[in-house]
């Protein structure tokens, strides 16, 4: 009972710690040599060891023991019953515990448990303290960055109210711009600690919106102020808002600073200049510290191995830290440029060449209408053109503003890019047409001068700096924005029809780079036409940037599919077994897909692609590695055989990719649990597909231009890519044997050689005989259990597209393309090898990343 009841006797005075020690030691020494009643067979040596252990236990910290006795004394004072004084035992064995008070002696049965519990508690506290320190070290950077962003936003709001409102709270242009973006311009005026409930990304987004809105409104005022700078040089420093002391970071060296003087007293111009220089010096000091930390993290990021699971988690964590660090670097830059009022363009304005203004949609439509020669043009779609695949590329342009500032002006201006795009569209009228399906099921692209299908052109700004993308090897995960505006399958746009071209220009933070996303349906143009359009766009952009001083070079492009029909030979060759299976197999699914409209078919296939967990990675293989592998394979094939034809890089890469994908499929099937459900599923697949369940269909893409006479000289840029199927036994292709790999390379070489003009003419005749044949071929690809689509884009001249700021730094498809898809990317000018992109399901990709042969030949880019 803990109720305060009056005590009948005063509490017993507890002996001190030293007295307890002496008393217990005397008791044990008195009875050490007496015979034990409970265990008379105990030897003297054991009793001596016992005394030594007891003496060692008594060396515990005196302060801890006194605190323990103090706690027991407090408990005694609250107890209702009185405590009796312990008496020494009469004839007790030293191995038996003494009868003591509830304030138990440390030699009682529970004393050892108490000591062990105390040691365990100390160990737990030490581990908790270490974990807390590690957690604090991990989160201190995010907390400091949130505080930095909050202070910067508060200062921006003060400048906003001072320059745009004064004493009035009416809406200004900055407020209207922020409210259109669904942001609150008075967040920090209403709630002083509102940043504590916001994430770092939300704070960064609000800061970016504030800076962009205020820069656009302050640009005329900054130019006028710069014009008067020569007359009154001290005026900008006097008008400059006095910023608060910038918050320090844990990795920034601390420095003693004097308190800010009262701003109400007038100060001379020299003191104002000294104050401004001191503030700028502090900001530059923090910027240097952030830069050093950034380079240290980048070095550590590159030292980590992507193949190790622990390193992969650390790389993902470091990627987030690097992204936040780049944002903080840009915040410091904005503080120097915006808050300090010393923007380079305002302080030292440079004469810029006149750039063409970005035309409005109505004027752009009118200029394109006037450029077309005919009122209505119908371009028939060839059955050789795939109607369900979209060619997707992205171009990353590095910032060349500082290197070419005086010569070429700003870095890829938005108005210049848009004007050049619309001018290039006049040379490609097919990209302003609409897909029309006639009554027989045949498709055409109709370009109506009075009803154009204008492309989708979007421009946005990003909060990621280019140097962060470069440090991450241009990994898609480094771009937090949704760069692709359309998916893999062509689907309806905002007006309900499929756009022939989609463009998204994402300008990186501080105009440090540009991500250019260009999308075209594969039924309109193939890779050759795609490259021709991008290169022509870059050529027109350079021409406009130079002021259109000379005449624009004339280019002629052919889109009419009739030139393909005229180039077809009359003699047709028979199709082999794999080609007959791919192009003459008929199914109800194929007829259903051919019956649907292009928009509905695109929506259906888009929803189907969402069901698979597709992931893509980019690998790099050196050309010297391919040469060594080619020598080994040719040596194996030449033993006892006549001289064989040399294998090309395309043959070896196609066979190697097919081998590693087949190996991943076999390993995934072998590692699956042998349960009833899994066995039933495999039996159902084998019953539905028969022998197809034991083979893999490799669908290669081939260009018909070099195989048809005169087609390449006509600059035909329409659909000219066809699929070449190869059916290979799955288990045989998955064997890690040089003989099997050499046989696969030879089979690829034979299939490519057999793809001549007579076979192309037969396939064209077969597809034209039935309008639903393309649907049957598409259903054959969709229904096959094991398939792989391989395309070679290494010869496309996309890296030659210079928009006036240099060649693109990186070109790649989407992060997750179609399942079971591989592509040899365009040849990078600075690489001595090939970049290979593989997009498969997630469980297959994990097997590919662990493949010994693949990892020994290639290196993971991202």
Image (spheres, grey):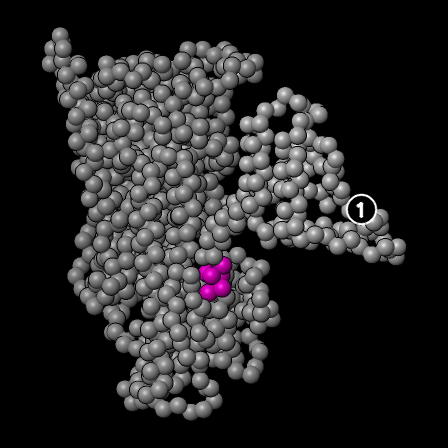
Rendered position, 205 above or below 93 = below
> Which residue corresponds to the image point at 22% horizontal and 32% vertical from the top-left?
705
Could you tell me residue 793's position as x and y percent? Answer: 27, 36
Rendered position, 766 above or below 317 = above
Query: Foreground: 51 or 226?
Result: 51
Relative placement, left or right, of 254 versus 133 is left
Could you tell me residue 218's position as x and y percent? Answer: 41, 75
Q: Secondary structure at mark 1?
A: loop
Which residue lies most toward the top here? 640
Could you tell me residue 590's position as x and y percent? Answer: 46, 23
Residue 433 within the magenta-colored segment of the rendering: no
Residue 145 within the magenta-colored segment of the rendering: yes
In the image, the segment drawn in magenta is 143-148
Residue 683 shows up from this direction: yes
Q: What residue is shown with label 1?
A: 84
> Which residue corresponds to the image point at 20% horizontal and 41% vertical from the top-left?
831
Q: Main secondary structure of the magenta part?
A: helix
Residue 618, by quadrant, is top left
Relative placement, left or right, of 621 versus 328 is left
Query: Foreground: 465 or 397?
Result: 465
Could you tell me residue 81's position as x and y percent? Answer: 84, 48
Q: Which quadrant is home to the C terminus?
A: top left
**Other residues around mark 1 within 10 Å, as few (<14) / some (14–19) / many (≥20):** few
> Which residue corresponds to the image point at 22% horizontal and 54% vertical from the top-left?
806
Residue 518 shows up from this direction: no
> Which residue corresponds to the image point at 33% horizontal and 78% vertical from the top-left?
277
């Amino acid at each position: 009972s803990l109720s305060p009841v009056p005590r009948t006797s005063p509490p017993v005075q507890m002996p001190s710690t030293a007295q307890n020690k002496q008393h217990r030691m005397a008791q044990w020494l008195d009875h050490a040599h007496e015979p034990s009643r409970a265990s008379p067979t105990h030897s003297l040596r054991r009793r001596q060891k016992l005394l030594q252990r007891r003496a060692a236990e008594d060396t515990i910290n005196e302060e801890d023991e006194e605190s323990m006795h103090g706690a027991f004394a407090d408990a005694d004072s609250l107890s209702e019953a009185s405590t009796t004084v312990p008496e020494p035992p009469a004839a007790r064995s030293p191995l038996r515990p003494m009868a003591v008070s509830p304030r138990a002696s440390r030699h009682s049965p529970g004393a050892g448990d108490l000591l062990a519990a105390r040691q365990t508690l100390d160990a737990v506290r030490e581990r908790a303290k270490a974990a807390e320190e590690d957690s604090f070290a991990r989160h201190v950077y995010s907390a400091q960055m949130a505080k930095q962003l909050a202070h910067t936003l508060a200062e921006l709001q003060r400048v906003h109210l001072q320059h745009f409102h004064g004493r009035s709270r009416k809406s200004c242009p900055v407020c209207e711009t922020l409210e259109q973006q669904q942001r609150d311009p008075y967040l920090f005026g209403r709630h002083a600690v509102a940043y504590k409930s916001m994430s770092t990304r939300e704070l960064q987004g609000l800061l970016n919106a504030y800076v962009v809105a205020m820069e656009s409104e302050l640009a005329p005022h900054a130019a006028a102020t710069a014009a008067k700078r020569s007359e009154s040089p001290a005026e900008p420093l006097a008008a400059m808002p006095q910023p608060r002391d910038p918050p320090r970071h844990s990795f920034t060296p601390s420095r003693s600073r004097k308190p800010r003087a009262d701003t109400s007293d007038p100060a001379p111009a020299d003191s104002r200049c000294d104050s401004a220089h001191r503030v700028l010096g502090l900001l530059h000091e923090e910027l240097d510290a952030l830069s050093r930390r950034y380079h240290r993290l980048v070095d550590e990021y590159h030292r980590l191995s992507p193949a190790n699971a622990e390193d992969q988690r650390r790389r993902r964590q470091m990627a987030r830290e690097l992204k936040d660090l780049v944002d903080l670097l840009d915040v410091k830059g904005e503080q120097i440029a915006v808050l300090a009022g010393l923007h380079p363009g305002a302080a030292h304005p440079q004469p810029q060449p006149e750039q063409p203004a970005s035309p409005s949609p109505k004027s752009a439509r009118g200029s394109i209408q006037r450029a077309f020669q005919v009122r209505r043009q119908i371009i028939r779609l060839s059955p050789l053109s795939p109607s369900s695949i979209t060619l997707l590329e992205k171009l990353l342009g590095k910032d060349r503003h500082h290197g070419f500032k005086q010569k070429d002006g700003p870095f890829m201006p938005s108005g210049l890019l848009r004007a050049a795009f619309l001018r290039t569209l006049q040379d490609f009228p097919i990209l302003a047409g609409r897909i029309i399906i006639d009554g027989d099921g045949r498709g055409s692209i109709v370009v109506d001068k009075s009803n154009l299908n204008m492309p989708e052109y979007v421009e946005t700004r990003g909060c990621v700096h280019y140097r962060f993308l470069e440090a991450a090897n241009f990994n898609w995960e480094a771009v937090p924005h949704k760069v692709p505006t359309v998916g893999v399958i062509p689907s309806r746009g905002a007006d309900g029809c499929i756009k022939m071209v989609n463009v998204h220009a994402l300008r990186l933070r501080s105009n440090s780079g540009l991500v250019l996303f260009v999308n075209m349906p594969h039924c309109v143009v193939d890779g050759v036409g795609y490259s021709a359009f991008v290169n022509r766009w870059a050529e027109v952009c350079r021409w406009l940037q130079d002021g259109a001083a000379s005449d624009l070079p004339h280019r002629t492009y052919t889109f009419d599919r009739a030139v393909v029909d005229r180039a077809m030979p009359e003699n047709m060759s028979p199709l082999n077994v794999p080609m007959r299976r791919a192009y003459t197999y008929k199914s109800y699914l194929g007829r259903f897909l051919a019956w649907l409209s292009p928009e509905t078919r695109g929506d259906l296939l888009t929803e189907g692609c969402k069901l698979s967990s597709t992931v893509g990675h980019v690998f790099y293989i050196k050309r010297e590695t391919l040469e060594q592998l080619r020598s080994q394979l040719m040596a194996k094939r030449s033993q006892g055989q006549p001289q064989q034809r040399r294998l090309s890089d395309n043959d070896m890469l196609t066979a190697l990719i097919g081998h590693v994908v087949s190996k991943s499929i076999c390993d995934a099937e072998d590692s699956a649990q042998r349960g009833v459900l899994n066995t039933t599923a495999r039996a159902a697949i084998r019953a539905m597909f028969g022998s197809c369940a034991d083979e893999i269909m490799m669908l290669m893409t081939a260009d018909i231009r070099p195989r048809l006479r005169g087609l390449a000289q006509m600059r035909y840029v329409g659909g000219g890519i066809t699929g070449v199927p190869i059916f290979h036994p799955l288990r045989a292709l998955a064997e890690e044997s040089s003989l099997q790999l050499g046989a696969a390379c030879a089979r690829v070489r034979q299939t490519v050689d057999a793809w001549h003009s007579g076979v192309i003419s037969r396939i064209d005749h077969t597809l034209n005989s039935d309008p639903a044949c393309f649907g049957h071929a598409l259903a054959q690809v969709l229904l096959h259990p094991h398939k792989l689509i391989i395309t070679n884009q290494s010869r496309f001249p996309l890296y030659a597209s210079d928009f006036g700021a240099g060649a693109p730094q990186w070109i790649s498809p989407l992060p997750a393309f179609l399942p079971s898809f591989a592509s040899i990317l365009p040849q990078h000018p600075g690489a001595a090898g090939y970049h290979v992109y593989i997009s498969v399901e997630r469980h297959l990709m994990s097997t590919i990343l662990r493949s010994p042969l693949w990892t020994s030949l290639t290196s993971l880019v991202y």
